[in-house]
Image: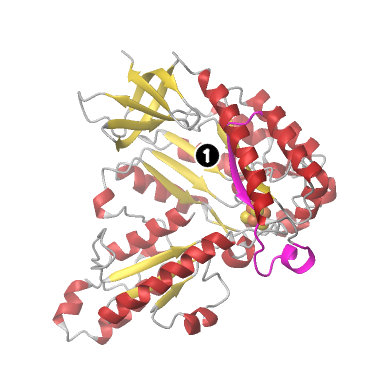
Amino acid sequence: MNEADSHRLASALEKLGVKHTDDAESADILVLNTCVVRQQAEDAATGYITQMKPMKQRNPDKVLGVMGCMVGVRGNSPLRRTFPWVDVFMAPSEPAPMVNWLLQRAARSLADEETSSRFALQDDGVPASATGADRRLAEHETGKRVTANVPIVFGCSHACTFCIIPFRRGVERSRPAHEIVSEVRSLVDQGVREVTLLGQIVDRYGYDLLGDAYHIRSYNPGAASGHPSQELAIDSPLVKLLRDLSAINDLQRIRFLTGHPNWMTDELLDAVHELPKVMPHIEVPVQAGNDEVLLSMKRGYTTSDYRRLIQRIRERVPNASIATDVIVGFCGETEAQFLDTYQLLEELKLDVTHLARYSTRPHTAAERNLIDDVAEDEKMRRLQVLDSQQERIVTEINAKFLDATLEILVEDRFKDKWRGRTPQNKLVFFDDDTRDWRGQLVQVKITATGPWSMQGARAG
Ligand code: SF4
C-alpha cells in the first residue's frame, strides 16, 4: 500500500513538472513514506526523519515531507512539534497537502522566474492525479514498469486488537469502480501488464458503498463458524470489478491482496478460477493457530474456520498458491499455543508465510487491555522456528515444479537474467539475450528450484 501511495505522490508531483532523482541529498523535494505497523518500522522512520534535519540546515530551500501511517488520519500537531524541520505532513494515500503546499509556495513567488519555471503550474489547480483516476507513471518508469499496485479500498474498520492500521489509515473506504477501471486503463496504456488490487481487507471491496446493512460493524463475529459473507446474498463487488478489469485489452494479469478469511466467498474463489486474467494466488492471513489467541486478537474466526477456508480454496481453485501472515509472541501466547500455530502450518503447507514478532502499538485494544508478556528473545526464537519450517515446506512445494514448463510474465532484468513470476506468484529467473522480454508472457522450463526462487530456460 505504501509503495502504491509513493507512486501516486510521484505521479502528482510530475504533473507539476518535478523530475525524479535517485539522489536524496541533491533533491529539491524529499518525501519519506512511513510505516508504523511494528515498533521496529516506527523506530526506522524516526531515524530517517532525524537524518533529514542536517539536510534542511545545509539547504533551507529543500522541501521535506513525511507521509503515511506515522502521520495518520487524525492530525499531525505532535509531529510538527517533534520534527519542526519537516515542511509538509501527509496522511496515508493523501498527496494533496504536498501538491497544495508547492502550488501555494510557487504562487507566492510568482515573480521569481526560477521558482515558477521549476514548478510548471497548471491553471486548474490541484491535478486530478492527487486523488483521482488519471494516474501517470513516473517518467523514468513509463514503458518499463510491467506491474503496478492499485489501491481499491483505503483504511480498515475491523479493529483487530493488535493493529494500528484503523487508527492511522482510517475507516474502510472503497474507491468507485469506474475510477479504478480508468486508472488501470491508463496504466495499461503506459505499458503496465499486471495490476495488484490492494486493500487491508480487499475481499470487503465495495460493501461499504452499499450502505450500513453491509458495513463490517453489522457483522456478528459470533457467527464466524459459518461464512457470514455468503449470508449477504448479493453479488460481490470485487467479483464485478475483476470482470470489468478482465475486459481491458493488453492487461495480462490481475491479482488482489490482502484478504480476510471471513470475506473470501465461494463466488470470489470461483471468479479466480474462471477468469483467465485473475491469477491463482490467494493471500489470507491466519495470524495464529490457536483459538484462544485468535479470540484475544478479535480476528472473528476459529482455526476450524480457517482449515475449512483452505480446503474451499483448494477445491475451487485447484492450482492456487496460498499465502498467510502470522504474528508470534502475541500477549499471553504460551508455548503450547505457539505449537498449535506450528502444527496448523505443518498441516496446511502454505506457499508463503509472512512472519512478524508482536510489538505493542499505541491506541490499540491490546495496548489498553493486554500485557505484552512474551520476552523478546522468545519471540525471536518462535519466529526462527516458523521461518525454518516455512523454508522446508516451500522447498518441498517448489521442487514439484522441476522440469515443468510455466508461463512467466517478465518484469525486469536482474543480475544479467530476466526476472518474472508464474501465475502462482513464484519468482523465476532465465537467461535469454535474443530480445527484450520485459512485459512478455514467456514459457520457461524450470531447471532448478529453491525456496525463494526458481531458475529456468526459455522453452520453444
Ligand atoms: S483486518 Fe485487522 S490486521 Fe488487517 S488491517 Fe484491519 S485491523 Fe489490521
Q: Is 359 covered by the magenta stretch?
A: yes
Residue to which mark 1 is pinned: 242
Image x and y of residue 359, in percent: 65, 59
Residue closest to the eye, 49 or 322: 49
Residue closest to the eye, 381 or 114: 381
Residue closest to the eye, 385 or 159: 385
**In this view, which residue lies farthest toward the right?**
222
Taking the spot 49% from the left edge, 40% from the top edge, the residue there is: 244
Ligand 1 has an atom within 8 Å of the beta carbon of the residue at disc 1: no
Which of the 4 image quarters holds residue 317? top right
Taking the spot 63% from the left edge, 36% from the top edge, the residue there is: 268
Quadrant holding the C terminus: top left
Which of the 4 image quarters holds residue 213? bottom right
Q: Is 186 covered by the magenta stretch?
A: no
> Dot 1, how many residues are within 10 Å of its Cα: few (below 14), some (14-19), or many (20+)?
many
- 323 displayed left or right of 162: left
Image x and y of residue 432, in percent: 25, 23
Chain part drawn in magenta: 349-371
Rendered view: 223 above or below 311: below
Q: Is residue 245 visible?
A: yes
Which of the 4 image quarters holds residue 431? top left
Taking the spot 40% from the left edge, 59% from the top edge, the residue there is: 6
**What's the residue type where badge 1 is placed?**
Leu
- 384 displayed left or right of 216: left
Rendered view: 393 above or below 152: above
Image x and y of residue 34, in percent: 47, 63
Taking the spot 64% from the left edge, 38% from the top edge, the residue there is: 386
**In this view, which residue lies farthest toward the front?**
377
Q: Quadrant of ligand 1?
A: bottom right
- Tell me the SS state at disc 1: helix
Rendered view: 76 above or below 314: below
